[in-house]
Image (spheres, rainbow, N blue to C red):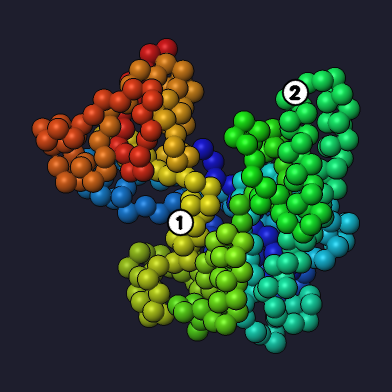
Amino acid sequence: MGFNCGIVGLPNVGKSTTFNALTATAAAQAANFPFCTIEPNVGRVAVPDDRLQQLVAISKSASIVPTQLEFVDIAGLVKGASKGEGLGNKFLANIRQVDAIIHVLRCFEDDNVIHVENSVDPIRDAETIETELMLADLESLERQMDGMAKKAKSGDKELKAQLEVMQLIRDALNSGQPARTVEIPEEMKKGINELFLMTSKPMLYVCNVLEGDAATGNAMTEKVAAMAKAKNYSSVIICAEIESQIAQLGTEEEKKEFLDSLGLVEPGLNKIIRAGYNLLGLQTYFTVGPKEARAWTIPKGAKGPQAAGVIHTDFERGYIRAEVIPFADFITYKGEQGAKDNGKYRSEGKEYVVADGDVILFRFNV
């Protein structure tokens, strides 16, 4: 399963710098003027997971293959984007295609970095972007409802039920509430997802601060955290400039020494990944063999066949069983044979709900 996050925000808040840091590339041109990102840059980044190293230490796998996340750097939006202001229409379309939204907020004062509103206020900035997304969603939804209403006249109960849910979402948007605040019946979720509403996507606020505030945050990040909690969103604090410097360091030892000197426990990337996993309800399982130890991303609650399908559709179609060792047991008993000897090696059928960290060998027949 892919994990695709669009990085959004007003111009000059640190979006492209954050993107460059996350992907350890210079693919996005970070500059001190609006709209320096003209085409959405896409970067894939390996998910750091210490468990892979532990698995390899025991299994002696020849290589490690981590799971990956995809980040899309989308040009800065401005007030009026929903009506085509700035580069609005083009990039609102890019946001519709991502799974989750990472909203970078400027939480620092710096006279050398201009702000499109001529003052720094992350709460105002967050509301500006959310309003533009809601307005664009409302226009899109009403257009789709017109078409749906004509089809629903045929008496199709399913279409009528979906139209009723769409009306609830429209009411929410009209009252200034994003689509994600509307409770969607499980059987309707697939159809509603196909509406590609931006405000139905989970949101993570990333507070971009100066180096001195990277460890503890500041008054602005506290306000953002309170706003996020009230909306049932998540928020993390990073210093994009620090992340850029970390990305240029060659070894893990150098990175750790640099982080220690700043009083930081880990790079901001790790915090974003963890928050992103929680945001989308994702988890990891592992496959281990002589050639490689590999991490795979699946939704929480995924059953054996669904997890197998992430490797190959043939695995899901011909699923027989999953031979499972919980990660902790794999480590404690030094691998597969030790787990077997201690009764920690299980054979699970099609209804098995995969747990985070499971080490799995799938049996299938096609």
Residue at the (54%, 61%) spot, across then down? 234
- Can you give x and y, in whole percent of width and height, for residue 268 in the image? 48, 66
* Residue 248 visible (yes or no): no
Quarter residue 318 falls in: top left
| Image position of 50 (left or right of 166) | left
**Relative to 34, is 25 above or below?**
above
- Can you give x and y, in whole percent of width and height, for residue 264 in the image? 40, 74
Give the alpha-carbon distance from disc 2 to disc 1, as whole Å: 40 Å
| Image position of 193 (left or right of 327) | right
* Residue 167 visible (yes or no): yes
Residue placed farthest to the bottom in the image? 111
For label 1, the residue is 274
**Relative to 335, is 253 above or below?**
below
User: Helix or strand or loop: what does disc 2 sit on?
Assistant: helix
Quarter residue 205 falls in: bottom right
Quarter residue 358 falls in: top left
Viewer-side label of 2, 1: 2
Q: Identify residue type, mark 2.
A: Lys
User: Dot 1 surroundings within 10 Å: few (below 14), some, or many (20 or more)?
Assistant: few
Q: Of 150 and 325, which appears nearest the observer?
A: 150
- Can you give x and y, in whole percent of width and height, for residue 283 in the image? 43, 44
User: Dot 2 surroundings within 10 Å: few (below 14), some, or many (20 or more)?
Assistant: few
- Can you give x and y, in whole percent of width and height, for residue 32 in the image? 72, 74
For label 2, the residue is 157
Residue at the (37%, 71%) spot, across then down? 265
Residue at the (79%, 77%) spot, across then down? 117
User: Helix or strand or loop: what does disc 1 sit on?
Assistant: helix
* Quarter of the image that includes the C terminus: top left
